[in-house]
Amino acid sequence: MKIIKPNRLQKGDVIGIISPASSPDDLTRIDTGVHYLETLGYRVEVGKHVGKIHGYLAGNDEERAEDIHAMFRNKYVKAIICIRGGYGTTRLIDKIDYRLIKSHPKILVGYSDITALQLAIFQKTGIITFAGPMLAVDFYNEVNPYTEDIFWTLLTSKKKIGRISFPEDEKLHDLVRGMTAGSIIGGNLAMICSLMGTPFFPSFRNRILLLEDTSEAPYRIDRMLNQLKLAKVFEHVKGVILGAFVDCNEQDPSKRTLTLGEVIDDYFGSLKIPVVYNFQHGHLKNNITVPIGLKIKLNASRGIIEYLEPACR
């Protein structure tokens, strides 16, 4: 597969705003996030259907897909940032015009439920997208300086970042020591599993797998990791990076349970490839942006992750 990089973002460029999954409970977050982008010197184009509510969805499927197509079709829009995750992105991926997207490669940013759209785009087009901060989640209030710095550096530079510096003295924990290199792919665990058996499930062969999730009990994490194991995903990848698994603990003290750590160790502790845990990516304030499809180096023995190339051209 030929990897396609989007053009870098420059001050004065137009950033499109879409909501492929759910709407925020507080719609004023959209205006606040738009104001943040404008104060940085960007112009903003808000999707026609942004702000709509259809149950737990941000409008019906046709409306949300229409906003995606409109942003990729608009020659003035250089980057597209999702408002939030939630639920609903998987309902769109068989309605997307991937030839349109491939002919107009652009920066696309989101994580969590947006993982489904990002992996589908990567599988169908080879375009690098960005698992990173979203408008009504990370940019509506006080913006985390660490998240902000690495995000804008990736989107605006033609230079590689190189070695990732972790925030607040956080360190990677090695589950399996060793060193490897390859393109990083993955994101939200539940979304990856939801694509299995579909034409939108990407190949993980010889790639480095990124996994994160939130608010899933250990037995549910167990179930999803077992699905990946049965599909032989762990046999195909060259390494594994485990991000944040926020609130993935059993909340009912009366229930018998394995700990999250025990589940993680069951699936990754005996692998013959490098595996690290505690990568600062996912549902947390210090959120490292990950370009899906970028070549990286993983040194689990020394707790080092290095981006080997620029994410944009």
Image: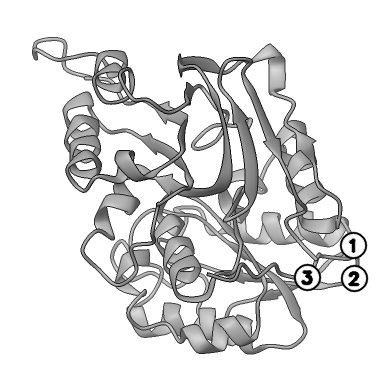
* Mark sitting on residue 7: 3
Sooner in the amino-acid sequence: mark 1 or mark 3: 3
Residue depicted at x 57% and y 45%: 182
Task: Determine whether, in the image, residue 147 is placed left or right of residue 222.
Answer: right
- Residue 220, by quadrant, is top left
Q: Position of residue 161 (x, y in %)?
A: 80, 42
Considering depth in this image, is 241 or 18 the residue closer to the camera?
241
Q: Can you say whether 83 is above or below 74 in the image?
A: above
Residue 191 visible in the snapshot: yes
Circles 2 and 1, Cβ within 8 Å, touching? The answer is yes
Q: Tell me the residue that label 2 is attached to.
A: 12
Considering depth in this image, is 3 or 312 the residue closer to the camera?
3
Residue depicted at x 44% and y 53%: 25
Q: Tell me the residue that label 1 is attached to.
A: 41
Sooner in the amino-acid sequence: mark 3 or mark 2: 3
Considering depth in this image, is 15 or 162 the residue closer to the camera?
162
Q: Can you say whether 243 is above or below 155 in the image?
A: above
Q: Amino acid at mark 2?
A: Gly
The mark lying in front, picked from 1 and 3, is 3
Q: Position of residue 100 (x, y in %)?
A: 55, 88
Quadrant containing the C terminus is: bottom right
The CA distance from mark 3 to mark 2 is 14 Å
- Residue 39, by quadrant, is bottom right
* Mark sitting on residue 299: none
Task: Determine whether, in the image, residue 154 is placed left or right of residue 236.
Answer: right
Q: Amino acid at mark 3?
A: Asn
Mark 2 neighbour class, 10 Å CA radius: few under 14, some 14 to 19, many 20 or more: few
